[in-house]
Amino acid sequence: MTQVFNFSAGPAMISKPVLEKAQSELLNWLGQGTSVMEVSHRGKLFMEMITECDKDLRQLFNVPDNYKILFLQGGARGQFAAVPMNLIGAKGKALYLNSGHWSGMAAKEARNFCELDEISIVDKDENGVISVNRTDFSDIAEQYDYVHYCTNETITGVQIKEIPKVGNAVLVADMSSDIMSKPVDISKFGLIYAGAQKNLGPAGITLVIVREDLIGHACQATPSIWNYETQANSDSMINTPPTFAWYLCALVFKQMLAEGGLEIYAKRNEKKAALLYSYLEQSQFYRNYIAVANRSVMNVTFSTDNDELNAKFVAEAAEAGLQALKGHKVLGGMRASIYNAMPIEGVEALIAFMKKFEAENA
Ligand SMILES: *Cc1c(COP(=O)(O)O)cnc(C)c1O
């Protein structure tokens, strides 16, 4: 079999040492003679595993002591609803910053639960180049119970690299597609959430990191599985958690710590993205439509000027072992998702293929 590199946007690549560890333990977890999937989530060994997972994540992501870490279900979309249900309070209104598809979806869902104002923060210039035009909301933010934004728009590849200024307002971030790709000052946020299937592990589990003072104010109708208070008070186990997904995330955190933590990953991620963008910059054949300041380090979008060539590119790349390069259906073109687990060799192989394809088709 040819070496395969998987550029899927999500569920995405999981690093080989993690999968190998899971494989080695699959039939016999910690000497129990069963898999981790078949034991009680309330049992001693599973509880020890999640306690260590919490500790590892705190160390890795530098989570302050006054934040709770929850592992929930329902994906990032579940949080689109859970956030307003839990955080709408005295002011009765939230501010949503729209930088693309996912932040727009978050606002759309939140409208079912609260009043909100939505501001578009991206511009498209005459050449089709997208840029973020505003990150300072300190003049208006404090009229709202919280301000929501998406750090990395997975579909277009628009990343907001500086934390928006919101004065003393509560800042909420959907970090689904760039969480733990670099160190972040968590104290600037009231709440961070992310579906696991891009950068943390498999689908089926959702990470929520929430400041303690924001817990306990959910509106009456909030389902207990999405109430941060009930979940925080029951170790994220108000119902049976997705135990195998949780276990895999715990293995990912251990692996990341063993490799030296987020600074190492940040450097590696910057290097991978720089390689790809500098190739795109000099090419007359491929184009990326994101302003330099907002180019995503995780999702690199590009296309030729011809849909048929794009389809040919995706098909031939897959044959060469470079999988899942088709862009999202709302955008077309190509997208290379180069999350934490993607080694630099994957990016190098992609660039070599792009050169060859350009030479053959330009
Ligand atoms: C993938 C993604 C989502 C949707 O996640 P689900 O877990 O499928 O609900 C939301 N926001 C962003 C930024 C994403 O990348």
Image: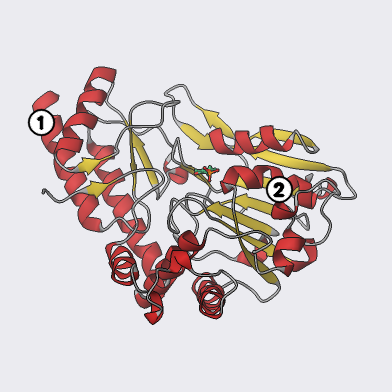
CB of mark 1 within 8 Å of CB of mark 2?
A: no
The location of residue 274, given as percent across then percent down, is 31, 51
The location of residue 298, given as percent across then percent down, is 40, 49
User: Please, what secondary structure does the residue beneath circle 2 have?
Assistant: helix
Tell me the amino acid under the disc marked 1.
Ala
Residue 100 shows in this picture: no
Q: Specify the quadrant of the image occupied by residue 191.
A: bottom right
Q: Is residue 315 above or below residue 217?
A: above
Circle number at residue 82:
2
- Please state, as top left, top right, bottom left or bottom right, where the C terminus lies in the image: top left
Q: Residues within 10 Å of mark 1 (few under 14, many from 20)?
A: few
Residue 273 shows in this picture: yes
The location of residue 338, given as percent across then percent down, is 34, 50
If you read the primary sequence from the N terminus, does the residue marked by circle 1 or circle 2 appear first? 2
Which scheme is used to colour this image of the protein?
secondary structure
Q: Residue at x 55, y 30 (%)?
A: 123
Q: Nearer the viewer, mark 1 or mark 2?
A: 2
Q: Specify the quadrant of the image occupied by residue 283.
A: top left
Q: Residue at x 31, y 63 (%)?
A: 19
Determine the residue located farthest toward the right in the rendered image.
90
Left or right, residue 338 beside residue 344: right
Tell me the amino acid under the disc marked 2.
Ala
Question: Distance between the Cα atoms at labels 1 and 2?
Answer: 50 Å
Circle number at residue 359:
1
User: Please, what secondary structure does the residue beneath circle 1 have?
Assistant: helix
